[in-house]
Amino acid sequence: MEEKRFDLVIVGGGPGGYSAAIRAAAKGLKVCLVERENLGGTCLNWGCFPTKTLLHDSRFLSELRSSGFLEGEVKLKFEKVMERKERVIQNLTHGIETLLIHRGVTIIEGQGMLLGPKRLAVKKRDGSEMMVSGERVILSTGALLDPYPFKTDGEKVLSSRDALRLKELPASLAIVGCGRRGVEFGTIFRGFGCEVVLVEKEDRILQQEDVEISHRLRRILATKGIKVMLHTEAVEAEVSDGGKVILHLNTKKGSEKIEVNKVLVPGRRFGNIEDLGLDKIGIAVEGGFIRVDESLETSVSGVYGVGDVNGKGFLAHKALVEGILCVDQFTGRSMKIDLRLIPRCTYTDPEVGSIGLTEKEAEERGEEFEVGKFPIAASGRAATLGEDQGIVKIIFSKRYGEILGAHILAPQATELISLASLAMRNELGIEELKAAVYAHPTLSEAFFEAALDVRGEAIHFIKGGGE
Amino acid sequence: MARAITIPQLGLTMEKATLTTWMKEEGDRVEKGETLCIIETDKIDFEIEAPQAGILVKIMAREGDILPVGEVIAVVAREGESFDLDALIKEAKEVKPPFEEKAAEIQVPISSSGLRVGRRDLKASPLARRLAAEKGVSLEGIIGTGPGGSISKEDVLRVVEERQRGPLQVSKRVPVKGIRRVIAERMSLSWHTSPRVTQVMEVDMTELVRFREESRSDWESKGVRVSLNDILIKVVSRALIEIPEINSSLKGDEIEVYGNVNMGIAVATDRGLIVPVLRNADKKSLLEIAEESNLLIQKTREGKIGPDDLKFGTFTITNLGTYGIDLFTPIINPPESAILGVGKLDRKVKVMEGDQIAIRSTMNLCLVFDHRVIDGAIAARFLSRLKEILEIRDQLKEVV
Ligand SMILES: Cc1cc2nc3c(=O)[nH]c(=O)nc-3n(C[C@H](O)[C@H](O)[C@H](O)COP(=O)(O)OP(=O)(O)OC[C@H]3O[C@@H](n4cnc5c(N)ncnc54)[C@H](O)[C@@H]3O)c2cc1C
């Protein structure tokens, strides 16, 4: 059988895998990337990019509709929206392929399976098989979504992939679970004009975010016409005779039913490790994910776990940075990955971007801290965008002015959060934030204002007044 | 206006600096902010920059000069400008360098005073600088693990913690008692009372190894496992009878020389080093020695050894060969006068008679002896005799 040898073999061509491949090839390693579906992984094909494209279009449409600038009804051609999404994805996946080829990465289309710590069998798309071996192996096979709390059928009860394949916009949609993806899909479909109900069994949406941000976002969603049902557990989805879905709910008051056209079940993640041959070479698995140490190495030396598959977070930029830093340690000194410094992003309207400790976490840790805030209502630039909802909130340590956490609910919050990321990674504190000059009028001025607010010195906002 | 360039005060305790390099020459045109020269203190390197554009009209210090803070080293003036040098110097010396802030010595006003930290390895995050100032640690010498090797908060905290903890990290405390205490006391007694000399001799063990191979089945048929150590006990016992000065003890004003050999065998156990004694080894056959030593070692390892088994040794053999040790200097087990350290059985290329090269089995014998009792020449004779018996087949056959 055909067998090829490489310095590095990577299984999975998502952000974790392709960033590792590009980095390694740029450093002169002979690299092979094995991908069984499409380059770009979940992120490009079923995650970040299709959703962001749809989010943009849905926002565009709803802004247009609510602007009052046009006469008559603005009618949506949903298939055009989906077409544009496909084009964007195709362009981007093609772009990734070009980058990989340009760097000299060998791309093999097929399913990889470990035979030994340095050896893999690849079942190619045409059915043939080949062997590849590498001095080192990176597993970056991502995560799959387990339908939860009930099964999907692809028609009425949808997974997130199903939702991205819809041919028509449903008139109404219930989403089970208000995590990042739940509220994101809710925002997208509401923007297109669909009736949206979000069902969440806990007491707030976006559990991992700062409490204040959760509550504020929930109020904003409500003003956009999204119904958020907290303390509500979805127990069953039943297709009615009329072709609708009856969602059975347990609420604080008792059981309830709602009728919708479709139900979206974002589901729970588990590592994409089936048929990877992990047990054959004794790679330890923990809670459905590949166990890795600080340097991303699995329990078998020379084999690494990068991205979603290691279960340490499910964000594309985490996978990207892990891919890069993992490779760096093969060729020299590598920076450590500080998981606390990975920004968390929720693409709603406005968006949520956060990093570091929440206020509650800072309290629990016994940190002495001060909070600087700047409401978006006070931002001149936000006013020009027609936005007045949201807040920028920065938590500083009292003693050194260190940034412990930043929480942004604002237009472009996912862009703004990188400013906090840059500052925290380089240990810039309140003084440094205050010392920089921010272009005016911009949203990023909120950082300056929030830092000033700690001493009640904000320029465009009076503490205690207004907000 | 003409400006005098002085040695700046860069830290609270700084008194002087060495001028290491002039980057400009007298008469050069300089731009504002351009580096004029580099000075060095025991802590840091600095570039002194031109405070204004003009001509470096005068240089008043040479490379290598050690200069006090405030000393005038040069003058920068506008082209064609005339000035009174003495007045400039006087004026410059009257102005006290501004340094009142209590800060880490490395925390230097950047750019505002026309100065810049010159040393690249002192990249530190603002937070790290603040922390260092507060904790009173110097950033000098701290290894940065932040972006681009800059010193981060963690790095400063690590140094602070190390400083608090001290250079030693005790992982556990084990009370010195029981066997450990006995070992400790006897070893220090030995170390402080006996002036030791060590002699090492390499022995060719090829014949002995062959002999052992040949005899193995015979021994096994008698149900005894004979180790290399057993053979050594036998051979050493013989040599001790022949050269009894080694088999002796210093007792007050006398040296007791013994007519029998009670051989101490050093045994490593979980509880520490124990040396059971095989009595009258000189009078026993090899197989008897083997049987008895096996039993003694087993009892010792199992902790079943009685006090009688540990007494009246006249000489000790200690073998670290199985641990891969080539040679070592064991400590004499008092009141004995000598101890034999046995190194590992090795294979070496040796030059034989007639300049032939051969692969041979070798081993080092290390004799440590108390020079109060034994002289070097006698010790050497003893080692030579051992070598002879071990190397020459006939001699060996005769002994064992
Ligand atoms: C709906 C949705 C929206 C999202 N939006 C965002 C967002 O906006 N921002 C963000 O940061 N994150 C987002 N994410 C998460 C993001 O997609 C993931 O964190 C990211 O894709 C993880 O990258 P990865 O390289 O670890 O794995 P993946 O991107 O999942 O890539 C794994 C690849 O491995 C391949 N593979 C698996 N097994 C094998 C095998 N045996 N042989 C060969 N190939 C194999 C798969 O086909 C896949 O292409 C979203 C996720 C979803 C589901």
Image (cartoon, coloured by chain):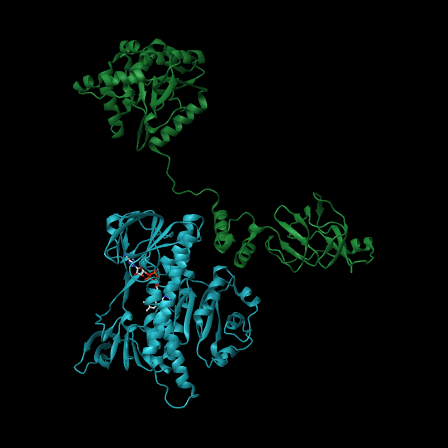
Chain colours: A cyan, B green
Toward the viewer: A361 or B353?
B353
Toward the viewer: A248 or B70?
A248
Q: Quadrant of the N terminus of chain B?
A: bottom right
Q: Quadrant of the C terminus of chain B?
A: top left
Q: Which residue of the protein is positioned furthest toward the bottom in this rendering?
A: A72
Q: Which residue appears at 33% of the width and 76% of the height? A: A186
Q: Is residue A301 above or below residue A372?
A: above
Q: Quadrant of residue A323?
A: bottom left
Q: Quadrant of residue A112?
A: bottom left
Where's ligand 1: which quadrant?
A: bottom left
Residue A178 placement (x, y as % from top left): 32, 72
Q: Quadrant of residue B215?
A: top left
User: In this image, A135 relative to A465: left or right?
Assistant: left
Residue A311 placement (x, y as % from top left): 32, 59
Residue B81 placement (x, y as % from top left): 81, 58
Q: Is residue B312 above or below residue B300?
A: above
The reply to whether residue A390 is in sight is yes
Toward the viewer: A39 or B83?
A39
Number of numbered discs present?
0
User: In this image, B46 relative to B374: left or right?
Assistant: right
User: In this image, A82 relative to B64: left or right?
Assistant: left
Q: Which residue appears at 50% of the width and 73% of the height? A: A446
Residue B338 placement (x, y as % from top left): 39, 18
User: In this image, B73 relative to A235: left or right?
Assistant: right
The reply to whether residue A206 is in sight is no
Toward the viewer: A104 or A54?
A104
